[in-house]
Image (spheres, rainbow, N blue to C red):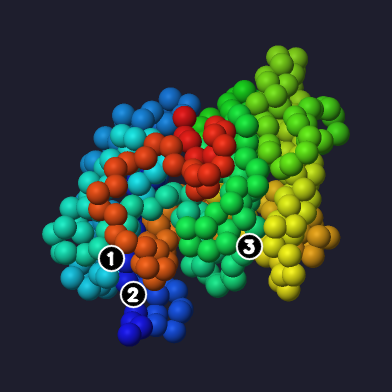
Amino acid sequence: MKKDLIFLGIETSCDETAAAVIKKSKAGKVKILSNVVSSQEKIHKKYGGVVPNLAARTHAEKIDDIIKRAILKSKCSFEQLDGVATTAGPGLLVCLMIGMTAGKTIANSYKKPFYGINHLEGHALTMGLIKPVKFPYLLLLISGGHSQFLSVKGIGKYKRLGTTIDDALGEAFDKTAKILGIKFPGGPMLEKFAKKGRSDVFNLPKPIIYKSGCNLSFAGLKTAVLNLSKKLKTKKDKYNLASSFQDTINEILKVKCKKAFKMFIDDNKNLKELNFIVSGGVASNQSIRKNLKKISSEAKFNVHFPPVELCTDNAAMIALAGILNYQAGKKPNIDISSQPRWPLDENAPFMKGAGLIL
């Protein structure tokens, strides 16, 4: 018998301590009852990046309060939950363990099914928090730790079409920002720099752009920015280099998306509706959104972006993934351990960007 389902989600894979309560009605409507996120941005800013042990200690200090706030805001009780879902990986091991311990403790205490969720699956299914999108669909996941194209065929059914062979796109943004003297986290501020500059001043490389397939590479681009930065003399030069960097990213994505579109269509023939979902923290970048909207329209794909607050790490997507795994008949996995590396497509050959945070 179908019933409303309410799940608690917990996320501690990196530097956000998050908890959320999601309800999916028996009619299929999804509602975010609460979504609490505590960022550690100010804590790590002076170090220029996330310090794992410091992040884990902060998670340990905040996790109980964040979960209580999520439960109170949802106006539900622990007894009313139908399940608990927690990010099991990929991520920073010492951080993952904090959330996993909290989630398993709650599940055991209240005798609720526990689901250890792949963080990437959370991003892959995020759009379901806003509106239903039919399987299969093409996913571009772009974040600080991951950059890959995936064919999403259903819950637990993911086929990797392409991935970064070195740096993730968000990592390239943050490192480029640091080179330009922008404090951590630099990605959002780099976008502001780019708006003040000209994109035609510097000619930057587009690594492996014309190679077959839709694998990505950003390390060479980052190195080129580093070399050019030594010659910059004015603030305007920095703005121009930031604009050139962002424009180069858009050119790379334009070429690689077209290849991914073709691969997806070849793999899913006779689809009446072509859907393209873009998720992850970098999907918040407005220039990239504008670029991908244009590319998708030209290829006759319907492109979907989660709201900005759901692009970055959050527990709402983890709770939803828990509900969908439960409905798909997946068995609870309370015995699962934290997984620093956990690719969505476990049959794909190993590459750095397939589910690894360094």
What residue does disc 2 label? 5
Front position among marks 2 and 3? 3
Asked if 222 appears above or below 250 in the picture, the reply is: above
Q: Amino acid at mark 1?
A: Gly
Mark 2 to mark 3: distance in Å? 25 Å
**Residue 262 quadrant:** bottom right
Q: Amino acid at mark 3?
A: Tyr
Per the image, label 2 sits on a secondary structure element best described as strand
For marks 2 and 1 on the same chain, the one whose residue lies earlier in the sequence:
2
What residue does disc 3 label? 137
Where residue 51 appears, x then y in whole percent? 38, 28
Q: Amino acid at mark 2?
A: Leu
- Outermost residue on the left side: it is 109
Asked if 286 appears above or below 13 in the picture, the reply is: below
Where residue 182 appears, x then y in whole percent? 58, 29
Residue at x 68% of width, y 37% of height: 216
What residue does disc 1 label? 83
For marks 3 and 1 on the same chain, the one whose residue lies earlier in the sequence:
1
Residue at x 49% of width, y 67% of height: 129
Q: Do the residues under discs 2 and 1 have CB atoms within 8 angstroms?
A: yes
Per the image, label 3 sits on a secondary structure element best described as strand
User: Can residue 102 be seen from the camera position used here?
Assistant: yes
User: Can residue 291 be seen from the camera position used here?
Assistant: no
Where residue 208 appears, x then y in whole percent? 76, 31
Left or right? Give the position of 26 relative to 166.
Answer: left
Where residue 341 appears, x then y in whole percent? 43, 37
